[in-house]
Amino acid sequence: MADIPPDTRTRAADVVPATLPRDRFADLVRSVALGAVILGHWTMAAVSVDDTGALHVGNVLARARWAWPATWVLVLIGLFFLVGGFANATSLSRARSRGLTAGAWARRRLRGLFGPVVPFVALVLAVVGLALLAGAPRSLTATVAVAVLMPLWFLAVYGVLVVLAPLGLRLDARWGWRVWIALSVGAVGVDAVRILTDVPWYGYLNYVLVWGLAQQLGFAYRDGRLTRLRAPALLLWAAAGFGTMALLASSGEWSWSMVGLPGDRSPMNPPSTQALAHVWAQVPLALLARRALAGRLDGPRVAPLLDKVADASLRAFLWHLPLYVVVTALWFAAGWPFPEPGSGVWWATRPLVLGVLGALLVVLLGLPARVRRRTRSA
């Protein structure tokens, strides 16, 4: 970083003191973002049995398109990568204070990120193989396997952003908010090419541009540039973001739902201009929430609970769909009826279903600790 002028050097996120206290609001946002994914997957899964007794899995939003406003609130992918940028900047700063290079830091970071994922993927593939050998329907088994593994794209993109974080911090130190504009313009350009050519592969670059923008905003969150903004500015910023989303959706080129639906161009796969606007809309709302909550998260009762939830959030994210598959399979094997997805009975039973799944997930996540305690006492 010797080529960074002295007057801009102090804006770099990686020169903020490495001894900053734990930012529990960032922990809260990450936990809520991953929790929203879990809640969304459990809620949207439309499981039904046809007249032949075959099991089918779909998306309830395809039948209840009126529920699209919920996706503007509950899809929090941009905030996940915002906090990822904050965490990467913090971790890299601490690593440099210990004399580690950016390359060594990235390798350690990636090992920590993907260490729990490798055995998880191996276990899922082993179960899928055993299911096929036991005579499970190939199409349904493949659908379930893809549904369980597909959410891992979060971690794949995050891994790329880890590698790019040192470069992003250098760009942030030199150019600041201009990097945000460049990434935004680039994302719009990529989306335009994708639409004009009707070649979805072009849009995959936006996984780096759109979510990379969220990471850059995370750098600015860490060094205080975003937290110093006043409430009126944040409200105006949010209104502009959601207004842009409404204009884009009303054009007919992008979906009103932030979750891809049959017949609509997916706003998230690959990330579109609509996804970009979603990032810009949600970040100021998160900053407004921080103004109201940050001072209450370090109390003697809240802090330990929040720490436990934050530490378990990634494991919960990994195991929430396998848990749903097992519960659904047991229900189906027992011969119990499934309510028609999207019906009044289906919606009325969602709170109970979500409550049971949540309780089972807590038990599942607590099993390793219980096994360790029993092993020590034996």
Image: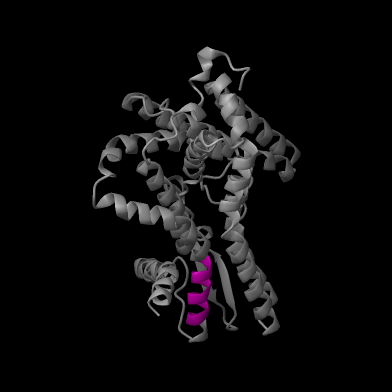
| The one of 41 and 196 positioned closer to us in this rendering | 41
Identify the residue at the far bottom of this view.
Answer: 334
Query: Residue 97: x and y, percent?
Result: 51, 34
Instruction: Tell me if I can see residue 128 in this picture.
Output: yes
Query: Residue 19: x and y, percent?
Result: 41, 35
| The one of 237 and 220 positioned closer to us in this rendering | 220
Above or below 356: residue 218: above
Tell me where the magenta segment starts and ends, as one range: 321-331
Instruction: Tell me if I can see residue 266 in this picture.
Output: no
Write the residue at 52% across / 19% down: 9
Query: Residue 243: x and y, percent?
Result: 45, 32
Write the residue at 58% across / 37% down: 100
Query: Residue 211: x and y, percent?
Result: 57, 39
Name the colouring of the figure. one colour
Membership of 328 in magenta stretch: yes
Q: Quadrant of residue 186?
A: top right
Look at the image and tell me in which quarter the C terminus lies: bottom left
- On the rendered structure, is 316 left or right of 50? left
Membership of 207 in magenta stretch: no
- On the rendered structure, is 131 left or right of 319? right
Above or below 131: residue 369: above
Write the residue at 42% across / 25% down: 225
Above or below 215: residue 338: below
- On the rendered structure, is 183 left or right of 71? right
Magenta span main SS: helix
Write the residue at 66% across / 36% down: 191
Look at the image and tell me in which quarter the N terminus lies: top right
Above or below 217: residue 135: below
